[in-house]
Amino acid sequence: MAKIVIEGGIPLKGSVKISGAKNSALPLMSASLLTAGKCILYNVPKLKDVDTMKDIMREMGVQFIEEDNLLIDSTYLRFKEAPYELVRQMRASILLLGPLLARHGRARIALPGGCAIGARPVNLHLSALSAMGAEINLDKGYIDAKANRLKGADIFFDIPTVTGTENVMMAATLAEGKTMIRNAAKEPEIVDLANMLRSMGAYIRGDGTDTIVIDGVKELYPAEHRIIPDRIEAGTFMIASAMTRGEVEIKDCRPEHLGALIEKLEKTGAEIMIGDENIFVKGPDRIRSVDIKTMPFPGFPTDLQAQFMSMMCIADGCSVIKETIFENRFIHVGELRRMGADIEVNGSQATVKGRKRLLAAPVVATDLRASASLILAGLVAEQGRTEVYEIHHLDRGYESLEKKFASLGAKIWRES
């Protein structure tokens, strides 16, 4: 079993290039099912989740050609269920439901798995597609859905859901009539998907706002699209630079996607310079404690909460971290405590009392972002080596993270 080993205490210095966004790549791959032809995606990250999505789509007759880009040929798409042994590895496989229904009229997908940060039910997806005329049954752990042709509908989400919004957007492109999504998610990945769908011939407006309108068409066409940079990866390196008292330039990123994090890092005392597609972060000599509350975009991302908590473990003073998105997203706290962190959890709120230092220790990653938070803690830990186990979570969402940190001067490597 592989592990990441870190000898902490080294300020990070240099520049790092950000990979394509995982949370864009998966819905964009799903969108290729909407047309019989060859779509090309650029800036595709090399991740386990991307490989899993390919395996699921291959089960349905989709072919892939990989060079410097990813060519997806769904000409010979056929009805075949997405099996549990693949779907359980990644809940984003639910994104195949909308495109399959819209183009094929049939879908059978195992109820999704993924990392253990909360229930994340798919009922919002299913009720929306039912409103569009789909007949949906749950059968022995599978979603079995049928529709002759979906109908446009007025959809209201009780809470903003990113994958729910994406699923309905894709389904609505080939539906008969107009679909309106109210209380839609506004994340940059939603806009990225809308841009690709428009290049395929879809009529979409309002993406990036809480109301999205889609006028269905009879047919979509193959297209080429470049995936946006991963704002969570960029944010992880920004936090790492600040907490190690480093000086790092984050290249090929979108500063406008990171406004909430930039504001919070500046309050910790970090110096931040913003360019068109790059951000320079210089860490403070003394880190000030800052409170955060996770919120849907443009608020503070839940996917950066664990990393920011690691930074607060060595800050001056006391910080309060409120998690409003997922009910189970403090499961990394126990591992940070093993490294000497002083954290008290009360429901959806964590109180972090900063300490002068963290101590190296063996720790176990419990989910994707927890993996990153433990690596960040290891970068500043003293007295020995930090060993992070169960790093298969890390490989789902970060491309060569340990190699990128090593290029910035960190003593970090992977061992079997």
Image (cartoon, grey):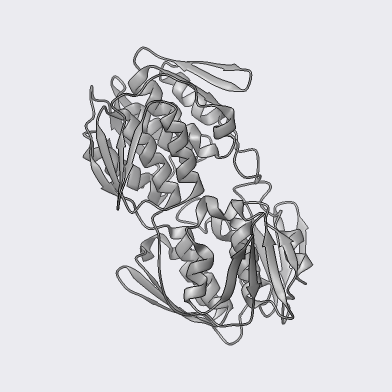
Left or right of 26? Residue 300 is: right
Rendered-image quadrant of the N terminus: bottom right
Residue 204 seen in render: yes
Q: How many marks?
A: 0
Residue ID at (34%, 27%) = 172
- Name the spot of residue 296 as percent of width and height, x first: 50, 50
Rendered-image quadrant of the C terminus: bottom right
Residue 152 seen in render: no
Compared with 289, 146 (above or below) is: above
Left or right of 296? Residue 57 is: left
- Name the spot of residue 341 as percent of width and height, x first: 75, 70
Q: Quadrant of residue 218?
A: top left
- Name the spot of residue 56 as percent of width and height, x first: 47, 32
Residue ID at (50%, 45%) = 49
Compared with 92, 328 (above or below) is: below
Compared with 127, 263 (above or below) is: below
Left or right of 31? Residue 135 is: right
Question: Foreground: 342 or 390?
Answer: 390
- Name the spot of residue 82 as percent of width and height, x first: 50, 26
Residue that sits furthest to the bottom in the current view: 285
Residue ID at (53%, 30%) = 124
Question: Foreground: 290 or 326?
Answer: 326
